[in-house]
Image: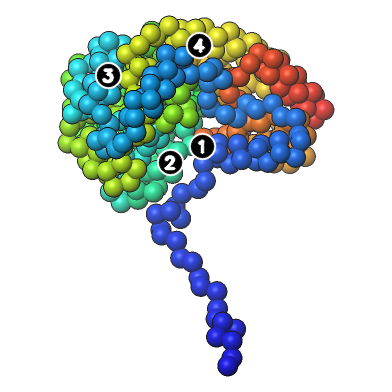
């Protein structure tokens, strides 16, 4: 009997159009390559990771341990426990003067899921979404995944990458459904001043455009008082807040985020979540309650240390001939312009190629600017120790000095 498998052909795998429209997260790809090189024994200084190097506060860890001991290990309501949602809206009210209710809040498996749920719940194929450049890597891919069209609004480096209401207004068309603000910004550290953010909200409301404000770095403003645009007068009817406990409380691996918005949108997000991840981890939810209700003493400590690091990093970058770097106003990233070193006959053709050389030759991990919509930058996270910052910046200086 003939071998029945001999004449079989390999089945062609046809992926969905949705997943084919997105790429692997650039930051995750950089992390994976760095991990591979570490496994081979290479000494690396990692400026790629966008996460605090601080430990999660002890009171938060103890709350998780107690939850485990109390056997709080079952499913919860898909949008999170009532206890957690009430704690989130209370914290937001105390910090920013907002007035959300638990029905206007959803807890998610990290801030990224909050953004995914919101965009999936709002955007239909062909809808336009205004996205300021530079932008966090995931925004564009999630818009594309939903079938929407990212409308890139180029901010100016010489103006500190500041987004203005006039820029947003010029980008609005009859197909515009949503605009996104990320302030403080990842990757540039730019901050939209409160008065300008309120004007952006007014423009969006006047044109029946939803405004999503990403508050992932909401406590890390260096020069001005932290704010939430949701605290502005009559903001609630036009705004969706997405946030995370990851940065504020050094809880990246705990995967707890949230969204605040009108109950019908939050309900739609909860419906989607009920068929995808369901609830965030029950243990992490108990830890999150303690994070937002307990002592906030760790937050100003982290902010002060980030400021100290920023004030060390930026002058060091500016001291490299040909490198230009704005002073970040928030978050914990520097976004230097290395355009002088790019092009034919120079260190590299692109920022991606240059970042690859830095990884291989200098042992320094950075994320190329193409991931954030610009071609002449890389992102450097200074959420790491001063020892590592000194070591890595010395390596960068030596690498660029050797390029002539």
Which numbered disc, 3 or 1, marks the residue that appears first in the sequence? 3
Answer above or below: position of 128 versus 232: below
Q: Mark 1 points at which residue?
A: 373
**Label 4 Cα neighbours within 10 Å, binned few <14 / some 14-19 / many ≥20:** many
Report, in whole angstroms, how far the alpha carbon at label 1 lies from the one at label 2. Answer: 9 Å
The residue that mark 3 highlights is 87
Q: Which residue is drawn at 76% across and 23% down?
A: 395
Left or right: residue 77 compared with residue 37: left
Residue 302 is marked as: 4
Q: How far apart are marks 3 and 4 (CA)?
A: 22 Å
Q: Name the residue under label 2.
A: 140
SS state under label 4: helix
Q: How crowded is mark 1: few (under 14 residues within 10 Å), some or many (20 or more)?
A: some
On the image, the x and y values in percent for residue 68 come to 39, 27
* Image marks 1 and 2: residues in contact by CB distance under 8 Å: yes
Whichever of labels 2 and 4 marks the residue nearer the N terminus, that label is 2
Q: Are marks 3 and 1 in contact (CB under 8 Å)?
A: no
Please tell me how crowded label 3 is: few (under 14), some (14-19), or many (20+) other residues with Cα within 10 Å: some
First in sequence: mark 3 vs mark 2: 3
């Amino acid at each position: 009997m003939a071998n029945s498998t001999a004449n079989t052909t390999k089945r062609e795998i046809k992926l969905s159009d949705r997943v084919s429209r997105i790429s692997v997260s650039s930051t995750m790809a950089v992390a994976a390559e760095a991990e591979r090189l570490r496994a081979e024994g290479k000494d690396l200084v990692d400026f790629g990771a966008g996460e605090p190097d601080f430990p999660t506060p002890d009171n938060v860890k103890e709350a998780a341990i107690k939850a485990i001991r109390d056997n709080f290990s079952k499913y919860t309501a898909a949008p999170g426990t009532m206890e957690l949602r009430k704690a989130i809206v209370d914290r937001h009210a105390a910090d920013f003067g907002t007035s959300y209710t638990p029905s206007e809040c959803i807890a998610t498996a990290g801030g990224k899921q909050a953004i995914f749920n919101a965009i999936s719940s709002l955007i239909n194929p062909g809808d336009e979404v205004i996205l300021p450049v530079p932008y966090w890597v995931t925004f564009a891919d999630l818009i594309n995944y939903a079938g929407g069209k990212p409308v890139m609004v180029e901010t100016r480096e010489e103006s500190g990458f500041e987004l203005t209401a006039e820029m947003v207004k010029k980008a609005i068309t009859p197909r515009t459904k949503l605009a996104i603000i990320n302030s403080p910004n990842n990757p540039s550290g730019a901050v939209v001043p409160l008065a300008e953010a309120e004007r952006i909200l007014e423009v969006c409301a006047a044109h029946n455009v939803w405004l999503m404000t990403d508050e992932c770095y909401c406590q890390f403003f260096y020069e001005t008082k932290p704010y939430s645009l949701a605290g502005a007068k009559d903001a609630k009817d036009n705004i969706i807040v997405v946030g995370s406990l990851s940065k504020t409380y050094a809880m990246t691996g705990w995967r707890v985020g949230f969204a605040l918005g009108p109950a019908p949108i939050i309900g739609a997000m909860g419906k989607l979540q009920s068929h995808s991840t369901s609830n965030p981890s029950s243990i992490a939810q108990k830890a999150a309650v303690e994070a937002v209700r307990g002592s906030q003493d760790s937050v100003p400590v982290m902010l002060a240390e980030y400021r100290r690091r920023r004030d060390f990093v930026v002058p060091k970058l500016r001291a490299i001939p040909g490198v230009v770097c704005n002073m970040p106003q928030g978050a914990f990233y520097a976004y230097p312009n290395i355009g002088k070193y790019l092009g034919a006959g120079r260190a590299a053709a692109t920022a991606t190629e240059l970042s690859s050389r830095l990884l291989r030759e200098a042992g320094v991990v950075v994320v190329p600017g193409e991931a954030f919509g610009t071609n002449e930058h890389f992102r450097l996270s200074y959420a790491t120790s001063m020892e590592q910052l000194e070591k890595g910046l010395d390596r960068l200086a030596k690498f660029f000095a050797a390029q002539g």
